[in-house]
Image: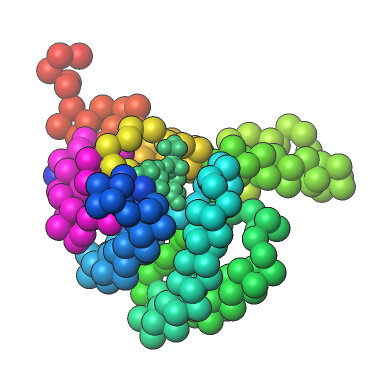
Amino acid sequence: MQAGPRHVAIIMDGNGRWAARRGLSPSAGHKAGVERIRDLIEACKERQIEVLTLFAFSSENWQRPPKEVELLMTLFHSYLRREARRMQEQGVQLRVIGRRDRFSPRVQRAIVEAESLTRDGENGTLVIAADYGGQWDIAQAARALAEEVARGERALDSIDEASLGEHILLSDLPAVDLVIRSSGEQRISNFILWQAAYSEFYFTDTLWPDFDVEALDLALDTFRQRDRRYGGRSEDGLEAQA
Ligand code: IPE
Ligand code: IPE
Ligand code: MG
């Protein structure tokens, strides 16, 4: 049996289908989806999960209809304004990862304020990936290394998995143990490509607005039964067959 995960990342998918089944617009699904987050943060804290990373808006999601993008931005802004104080009280540190320059100044300000308000939290970290793309993340890390080389601060030979990895976002946090995707899709959709190198994956048909604490526990139970080998032999080994 595996110990529980320290870092869980979730691709919160299925809001549109949840709404469509009820004859509602995608916006109603997004609103219902946001409501799930509060309980999950609490549940993660109770289960000693140190980091919860949520994929809220991908770099490709700008392609959605303008009305939907606008609603998602409004929801993101009001979430930050409303929940930052609660997180501060809970001692949860908030971090937003992704490009920031495409957000409106209002949203950018709310991000900075929420992060600074929750900076001293010691009871866990909530990471929100917004305008985030895994390929962008790798590219920004490569650019940071290239700048160090150009400034004469780094030798070209020192570029390897470890030095690039230090510039990939979340490198200061425990590795992502478990990636969950709701709604039945089984793809990564440009989420944490580098960080998920040895994550376990869990896919569920449950649509995001229905993903409750029970659904989380099911994912965690499945995780505990996984045999993580990292390319080696499992604990009980296959020595007999060697
Ligand atoms: C996920 O729900 C939320 C975002 C991508 C912001 P979707 O809106 O993708 O839901 P489906 O996939 O259409 O059901
Ligand atoms: C991935 O979901 C992004 C988020 C959940 C924020 P999408 O619904 O955008 O992904 P695709 O288009 O189905 O791959
Ligand atoms: Mg989707």
Residue 224 located left or right of residue 57? left
Find residue 200 and report its horizontal and vertical position in percent.
Answer: 31, 39
Q: Is residue 226 visible?
A: yes
What residue lies at 38% left-to-right and 53% top-to-bottom? 25
Task: Name the one closer to the observer, 206 or 178.
Answer: 206
**Magenta stretch containing residue 211, yes or no?**
yes
What residue lies at 63% left-to-right and 34% top-to-bottom? 160
What residue lies at 64% left-to-right and 54% top-to-bottom? 99
Q: Which residue ends up furthest to the top in the rendered image?
A: 241
Q: Is residue 169 visible?
A: no
Find residue 139 and report its horizontal and vertical position in percent.
Answer: 67, 39
> In this picture, which residue range is highlighted in magenta?
200-227
Task: Name the one closer to the observer, 22 or 185.
Answer: 22
**Magenta stretch containing residue 219, yes or no?**
yes
Find residue 207 and report its horizontal and vertical position in percent.
Answer: 26, 48
What residue lies at 57% left-to-right and 42% top-to-bottom? 63
Residue 92 located left or right of residue 106? left
Residue 8 located left or right of residue 153? left
Please tell me how many numbered marks the rendered image carries: 0
Find residue 84 and report its horizontal and vertical position in percent.
Answer: 46, 78
